[in-house]
Amino acid sequence: FFEKSLVGKTIITTASSTQEEIDPVRYISNHSSGKMGFAIAQMAFNMGANSILISGPSNLKAPYGVNRINVKSALEMLKAIENQIRLCSKNDIYLIMAAAVSDFKPKQPSAQKIKRQSKDMLILELEQNPDISKSIKEKYPHIKLIGFAAETNDLIGNATIKIEKKGLEFIVLNDVSRKDIGFDSPNNEVTIIFKDGKTKNLPLMSKKEVAYNILKHL
Ligand code: C5P
């Protein structure tokens, strides 16, 4: 039994990593499994929302009842979010940025596979991806945004700066230096930091329970 407190809301959740092409066979990415975002999308549906999941590459099964859209790069993720926002403009829309978006991408992906070099070094020039949360908030200020922060040091300080910079309602903070939680783990232990500075520490629990604890604040 789930309380249907999200009826009438559209919840767009992003999940997994993004892949940024170096050449046709190689890419830059990270260790995000997508489990947290998939759990949120599933729980959002269970709680009555119109639940849309925009996922980077992941082997996880599409959650029941959820509209899943697959993307690869950060730019594709940004475009997919904007398309969905335009499709449901009259709804109460929340964007939950659980994806570990690649901050950098190769400046000029090669059209051909890069061959071994005669010299020992290959220099790859990277440029920043847009900050998806920030761009969405600037363009669509009515959308309520929830962010995630995977930090290894000065956890609360860094997370608080992000709330302001990205225009978030709250941020879900996890400590990625711990091996027993976070990336690829079925469990997570998070702290929620709200924009008014209040914090809420949640004990170690399944990602499904973390999802419920996040969604009940919407
Ligand atoms: O700045 P940082 O990447 O640590 O912030 C993490 C939060 O920002 C996550 O919610 C992530 O999904 C989001 N993000 C974003 N656009 C990026 C990088 C991260 O929206 N280019």
Image (tube, grey):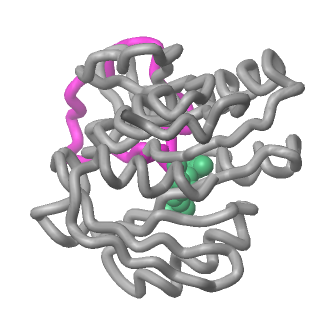
Q: Residue 112 at x, y = what percent?
A: 39, 12
Q: Residue 162 at x, y = what percent?
A: 62, 70
Residue 174 vs residue 164: left or right?
left
Q: Is residue 214 magenta?
A: no
Q: Is residue 47 above or below residue 80?
A: below
Q: Outermost residue, left direction?
A: 180
Does residue 17 appear in the picture of this structure? no
For image coordinates 61% across by 32% down, the residue present is 12
Magenta segment:
100-125
Does residue 163 appear in the picture of this structure? yes
Q: Is residue 196 above or below residue 135?
A: below
In depth, the one of 208 and 13 nearer the eye is: 208
Report the label total. 0
Q: Is residue 103 above or below residue 150?
A: above
In depth, the one of 149 and 91 nearer the eye is: 91
Residue 119 vs residue 192: left or right?
left
Q: What is the magenta segment's predominant secondary structure?
A: loop
Q: Residue 35 at x, y = what percent?
A: 29, 38
For image coordinates 20% across by 28% down, the residue present is 116
Q: Quadrant of residue 22?
A: top left
For image coordinates 61% across by 74% down, the residue present is 194
Q: Quadrant of residue 82?
A: top right
Quadrant of the picture in which ligand 1 is shown: bottom right
For image coordinates 24% across by 32% down, the residue present is 117
Q: Residue 57 at x, y = what percent?
A: 35, 23
Figure quadrant of the N terminus: top left
Q: Is residue 112 magenta?
A: yes
Residue 129 vs residue 98: left or right?
right
